[in-house]
Amino acid sequence: MLSVGKHALVESQRAVPVRPGSGLPQQVVYLTPKEELRFVYGHGSDTSIMLGEHVSSGNAPCYADLNELLGKHTAILGSTGAGKSGTVAAIVHLILDHGKTRDYSLWKPQIVILDPHNEYSSAFENHLRLSTDEGNLKLPYWLLNLQETIALFIGKTEFVATSQANIIKNAILEARIAGASTSRSISTGSSVLRRRCARSRRR
């Protein structure tokens, strides 16, 4: 019991005082009605997608509200081989097809999937693949901040060489100055950055 002065604020008790069936045999067990299942698993609406059916609850349909699903972080958890990638692909297809089922002419979601293991290419036939290795994705140096650039060129070590970090910093400053004075900002800045990095490696 937590008390302040003479007044008791909270009374706590360890463990569970009453357990189901403890000392009360032949208790009645009730099935969960569909109204309560809809409260747990959601219900269909214009802003929801049907994920599937819950087999342990009488094939109750399970819905996900798009505002909640896309407006917050979502995690798909499971052991190896449980079907996490397939679940993600199915959810993405449901989102893409939501406009067709609801007849939304302006429904054209743009979804970016980071797929380092190439798991989703077969699931989306009309996808656009972007890869730096294939030359169709170019990331300018100014996309990264100083800490990210140092981690890219030097590495995330506990003790980063101060001289190398200063070389990267000065190269970025020179590249930005050169880029501000010419229309070829990215190409000129990138060449300056490459020259400074090459010098640092020779040292």
Image (tube, rainbow, N blue to C red):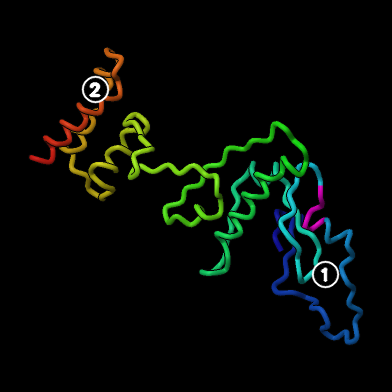
* Quadrant of residue 98 within the rendered picture: top right
Q: CA distance from mark 2 to mark 1?
A: 65 Å
Q: Residues within 10 Å of mark 1 (few under 14, many from 20)?
A: few
**Tag 2 near tag 1, CB within 8 Å:** no
Location of the C terminus by quadrant is: top left
Q: Outermost residue, left direction?
A: 203
Q: Is residue 42 magenta?
A: yes
Residue drawn at (46%, 51%) of the image: 115
Q: Residue 103: give x, y in percent of width and height.
A: 77, 38
Q: Amino acid at mark 1?
A: Gly
Q: Amino acid at mark 2?
A: Thr
Residue position for label 1:
58
- Where is 18 relative to 131, above or below? below
Q: Is residue 17 magenta?
A: no
> Is label 1 in a helix, a strand or a loop?
loop
Q: Outermost residue, top direction?
A: 181
Name the one closer to the observer, 74 or 165. Answer: 74
What range is drawn magenta here? Answer: 39-44
Going from the N terminus, do you reach mark 2 or mark 1 first? 1
Q: Residue 104: give x, y in percent of width and height.
A: 74, 35
Residue 192 left/right relative to 113: left
Residue drawn at (60%, 51%) of the image: 74
Residue position for label 2:
188
Residue drawn at (34%, 31%) of the image: 140
Residue 157 is marked as none
Q: Residue 36: give x, y in percent of width and height.
A: 86, 60
* Quadrant of residue 47 within the rendered picture: top right
